[in-house]
Image: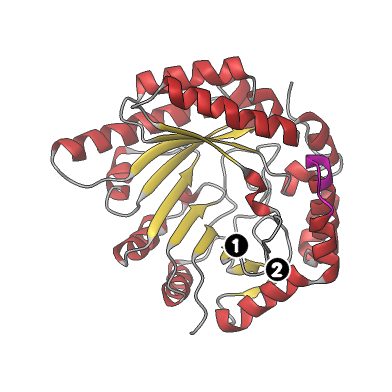
Amino acid sequence: MTVKIRKFIWNITYNCPLKCGHCYSESGRRPARTLDRAAAMQVVDVMLGAQAENVMFSGGEPMSVPWAVEAMKRLHDAGIEVTLFTTGWSMKERSAAALADAVSGVAVSVDGADAAIHDAVRERAGAFERGMRALDILHRVKDERRAAGQACYTLGIDYTLTRPGAAEADLERFVDAAVERFPRLDFIRFGAVIPSGLAAERAFETSGLLTIDELVGMIDVGRRFAARHDGGPRITVTDVRYFLPRPGSSVVDLDILQIEPDGGLRAFPIYEAKIGNVLHEPLDVLWPRAQAWRADPFVAEQMDKVRTMADWADTTRTLDRRYGSADDRARIARRGPATAVPA
């Protein structure tokens, strides 16, 4: 294998205890499609062969997969930066302890400042408390490892900003509470939901997406929080426009690939277009296909016309319905009116 890919996102399952109204993979609403252990280790070999520098494990809920920690550890032991994104729903002490030697970082995902907001967005009662309990467990393991002079993962919160969960006052009290409860938290990262998957549907577009101006304003809010908690966790607001072409740059050579639970490879992480399967064809064949899809005049035209989040949602709907597999298109058609985020 000659192709080198710097970063992979690996959604290892669609299985999820939650049914978030903005989920880009529609996890929790579709078959899990999780690979068996042998096939999963083949995928690990593909990423090792590509000399990956970063691998992000996501889902669905990745910790529901029996071989997840083993796969993470193989990559981690090879010197690759491995990050786990988890809802925290089923986190146990033994799992947190195993992660200490298997990943570089753990991010517990949050969608609201309290149970009322978070659980409504995630459509599951108890989701917020489960996430906080997972942070308690992970924080305790980190403390114990630190006291013993042992290395451990960085630990943080990945907060997805939807309209119901983005009020500055709510975010401020959330940050204050998190810093007090988890004093050795390494980061709190805010990022606006990307109009992908369910979040690109019209009902969510009008009720859940932030505007570009609001996103830019949130970057300033994040700076104020960071200044207030100087010396505490690193507080940032991620500019999700990273996934859009920028002046003087191109997505064609952006060396990031997303692998689906069955080994399928997306042409670009936030769109449904598939260009093959890493279990069936080498990246030397698949990567040029991804580049060709990204450079396709129709695709480039759709991406280049984005000026607002509504434009972006429209582009996603257009690309997903045009390039998604027959299975993707049938699933999208079954959505009907997209789930709106509760006010």
- In depth, the one of 153 and 255 nearer the eye is 255
x 32%, y 49%: residue: 99
Decide if residue 124 is in sight here.
no
When asked about the image quadrant of residue 283, the answer is bottom right
Q: Earlier in the sequence, mark 2 or mark 1?
A: 1
Number of labels in the image equals 2
- In depth, the one of 306 and 174 nearer the eye is 306
Q: Position of residue 39 (x, y in %)?
A: 48, 72
Residue 222 tag number: none
* Range shown magenta: 305-311
- Residue that sits furthest to the left in the current view: 148
Disc 1 residue type?
Glu
In the image, residue 308 lies in the stretch drawn in magenta? yes
Disc 2 residue type?
Lys
In the image, residue 78 lies in the stretch drawn in magenta? no
Q: Mark 2 points at which residue?
A: 274
Q: In this view, does 38 lie above or below 198?
A: below
Decide if residue 198 is in sight here.
yes
Q: Position of residue 333 (x, y in %)?
A: 85, 52
Q: Mark 1 points at which residue?
A: 260
Q: Residues within 10 Å of mark 1 (few under 14, many from 20)?
A: many
In the picture provided, is 181 more to the left or to the right than 313? left
* Contact between labelled residues 1 and 2, with CB atoms less than 8 Å apart: yes
x 29%, y 64%: residue: 77
Q: In which quarter of the image is the C terminus?
A: top right
